[in-house]
Amino acid sequence: MEEPLDEKDLERKLKKEQKAKSKEEKKLKAKQKEEARLQVQAASDGAKKSEKKQKKKGVTDENPEDLVDPDTPTGQKKLLASQMAKQYSPSAVEKSWYPWWESSQYFVADAASSKPPFVIVLPPPNVTGALHIGHAITVAIEDAMIRWRRMSGYNALWIPGMDHAGIATQVVVEKKIMRERKLSRHDLGRDKFLSELHNWKDQYGGTILRQLRTLGASLDWSRECSTMDEQRSGAITETFVRLYKEGLIYRDIRLVNWDCTLRTAISDIEVDRVDLKAETFLEVPGYSNPVQFGVLTSFAYPLEEGLGEIIVATTRIETMLGDTAIAVHSQDERYKHLHGKYAVHPFNGRKLEIICADDLVKATFGTGAVKITPAHDSKDFEVGKQHNLDFINIFTDDGNINENGGPQFEGMPRFTARAAVIDALKEKGLYRGMENNEMELGRCSRTNDIVEPMIKPQWFVNCNTMAKAALDAVKSKEIEIIPPQYEQDWYRWLENIRDWCISRQLWWGHRVPAWYVTLEDDKEKGMGSYIDHWIIARNKSDAVLEAEQRYPEKKYQLDQDPDVLDTWFSAGLFPLTVLGWPDNTADLSTFYPTSVLETGLDILFFWVARMVMMGMLLHGDVPFRKIYLHPIIRDALGRKMSKSLGNVIDPIDVINGITLEGLQKKLEQGNLDQGELEKAKEGQKKDFPDGIPECGTDALRFALISYTSQSDKINLDIKRVHGYRQWCNKLWNAIRFAMIKLGDQYTPPATLAVHTMLPICKWILSVLSKAVGKTVSSLEAYKFSDATSSIYFWWQYQLCDVFIEAIKPYFNGSEEFESARGASRDTLWACLDTGLRLLHPFMPYITEELWQRLPQPKEACRKDSIMISEYPSAVQEWANDKVENEMEIVLDAVSKLRSLRPPTDIQLRRPSFVLCRNLEIAATVRCYQAQIATLASVSSLKILTEDDPTPPDCATNIVNKDLAVYLQLRGALDTEAEHEKLRKKREEVQKQYDTLSQKMSASGYREKAPQSKQGDDMKKLATLLEELEIISEAE
């Protein structure tokens, strides 16, 4: 042990430590000072370089503060920096515009307007959490439609809403409470649990609304609603009462999809069908060990009267506890002597009649005998009704064997009983074996539990008459389905429709407006024991009045059905209820029917068909004129997006960017169990090793819409989205160039004098008009991907790559280009103004920001925002086929010249030559000589005729039969490589010539081919022959 220091030693030690600390601080300061000096030096060097560059370009000094947008008070028009930033920044551009649009009421539609209405109801997102990328494509497409129609003079209304999502929300909140507090909903009780659900709705409803605003959705927020609000709830109750009184809603005991975890019936959309090829062990909620599926178990039933036994097979051996018959084919000779005889149940002695069910039994399959469990199989249910069999339910609501299963198995979980039944059969010598069996298994998409068919008393809607009306609406083209191939799915589903189970044994949702009367002298006191004791009413007061009228002077107890209505019941009414139905509102008369229903193709029947059925029944008209079904988004590998795979994408993460660590943290905050969480994290590491880069809203929207050309699935690649973010930078730079070249004093003309303009200006206006026409026609045809392709092609390949590059020489200050400079400025302004308005519905933020920077024409009444300005239409005066044809030749020549440049010649400009074989082509080249030289980046361009000698040391390329180009390479010429290129070109043309010649020489060509086609083929053959001659000369 060390001795303690005396006072002097301690003082010396402290001084020493202080000195060392002071020395370290000095070193750190010196290092920081040096770093600061280097930064200043770098900035100074950069500024000097920038100054030189700017002097060269004629740009004045820039103050960094001039490039930053001032802060804008919320809701006011965005304040822009005096100069544009060097680079496009999504976060900077997308700031402040939305609050201004919203506060300016640009999104609000007017029911009293004389404009033609265009109406979309946003498919209400589920209040189960945040929006995912599937919602983003809906928003992108619908907002593009709404903004386009609004700019085109329509009274455009886009209605926002939120769906309470009964099962989905209840499952999420139940999991959350169990994870955080280890409590079930039953532990909390109905009232407290509903309070938790409302808190969740408020929290995540707000998140969804913020996401919609971030995505730029121009929704009419003054009409925002929810399926659970007072207006919608009243309408849902009204619908139930009306349909009941019309005999369309009834109560019955039927077979339903039952989830033993949720203890409720679920709809088909909540059932995932899993195909199993052979024996498979699956994890099932509530079981510690995986459960066996995909096998067929055979066993024997003993027959009465000493007739031996009959062997049956099943994939669900535990259901044999509820068997009430055995079915055979009437023509099967093996069993004819058993018709009407009985087998005996080995565990309870129940007599099972041998019946004939030819529709169900195939004599050649298996043993030709089928066990019948009417209470637990859909096909057996129908057989049971036909043969008046007993329906014996053997399961409790949570999936355990009940008293009907017998004391040997009562209380066992159903899949534990599966093994116990096999053991018991073996003990009795009745087990006959097991084999692999291909089968389909239903799993609940919410809980992952195995769906159990069970008979339950439920409320149903008779859909027959409504389905026929919905069928006829599509057949008569009253409703158009886009893409049309889904019409056949519509017909198939509605022609085979079954009555709709609309009750759910949940707590979250619209309570069934049904009250049960229990009379004092009733023998059975359980709710629903007597079918005629139900009262359907709008509220309890009305129910009490009816009970008193129906049972005068009798003592009774009145209890409301604890069940809630299927979420799709309220969702099916949404186009009506959002407009005020059942009240006769101004909105309902102006905006119903709506214009188009845009949604994913996966809910065509569960939601879309039901909206059509309900709308036609309750209001006498279809709810929308068109149905547009977008593809389902999958990940880049084509996999379905799933939280457990970790490939679900939050659109906000694509917009803002997020690190891998950020993605993983969000997973941890979710509802996944530990096993799923680890799997999801691994999936994220593989899919997003570097996280997701910032892409911005505009790039995400444009990418999603451009993907819609794919048929039924979209394999989303974030790299493609990021590519459009870089394209936004191209647009940004195009406007920066324009602002510099237009100058502060520039004022656009009221009209363009196109006939006096340069050919390059005439060309860009002509192709712009064509792009506008193509975009509008594509939007009208719901071909959104074609619209984005048309816009992208014009901006990228015609405006930026050709026109802007071609006019740059006119801005070098020379007086000889004064006239060309003026025409170029006017054309450039017209292109940018029109092009930004054309692009706005797809990219609202960047187009608003750039359009606001464009100068205004003199005495023009320009709108305050691009979103309420006029959408472009094709300008007939701009169309110029002659110039377009000439530019096609010019651009082909430029492309061929560029291809001749060696890869190392990035900066070097070389002399070039153009060989023109007739006067017309020579005139065209002469007219565009300067543009060809500029675009091809050559030092000079000389026009040659056939009489001129071939220029030496040149690489050559053939444009067409009348035009060839040469690039002088001198020392860089690889003669052998040039000959090889010509040889390959000759082989390619020769092959085309031979194929066409063979086709024209074929038997029957002259008799069958139209004269116009024969003429075209002759011309093409002559052209190919001329090209072969040109190649031979060049060789």
Image (cartoon, rainbow, N blue to C red):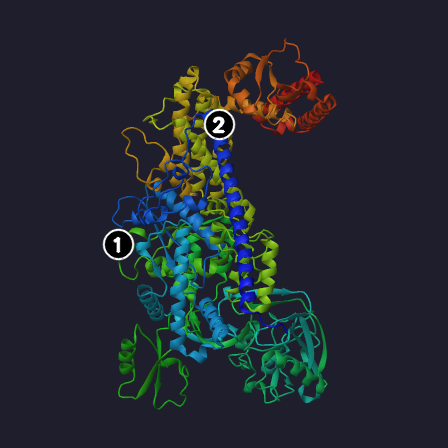
Report the residue marked by disc 1.
586
Instruction: Give x and y (percent) for residue 90.
Output: 45, 45
Name the foreground residue: 669 vs 122. 669
Q: Quadrant of the C terminus?
A: top right
Name the foreground residue: 550 vs 289. 289
Instruction: Give x and y (percent) for residue 259.
Output: 52, 73
Camera sees residue 121? yes
Dividing the picture into quarters, in which one does residue 293 lie? bottom right
Instruction: Give x and y (percent) for residue 946.
Output: 63, 11
Q: Amino acid at mark 1?
A: Ala
| Residue at the farthest front position | 8
Measuring 38% from the left and 27% from the top, which residue is drawn there?
743
| Disc sitting over residue 23 in the figure | none
Up/down of 926 relative to 587, above or below = above
Q: Amino acid at mark 2?
A: Lys
Up/down of 603 relative to 71, above or below = below
Measuring 27% from the left and 85% from the top, which residue is drawn there?
552
Camera sees residue 156? no
Name the foreground residue: 724 vs 219. 724
Please report whichever mark, 1 or 2, sits nearer to the chain's N-terminal start: 2
Report the residue marked by disc 2.
52
Mark 1: few/some/many CA within 10 Å (<14, 14-19, 20+) = some
Up/down of 557 relative to 600, above or below = below
| Residue at the farthest left position | 112
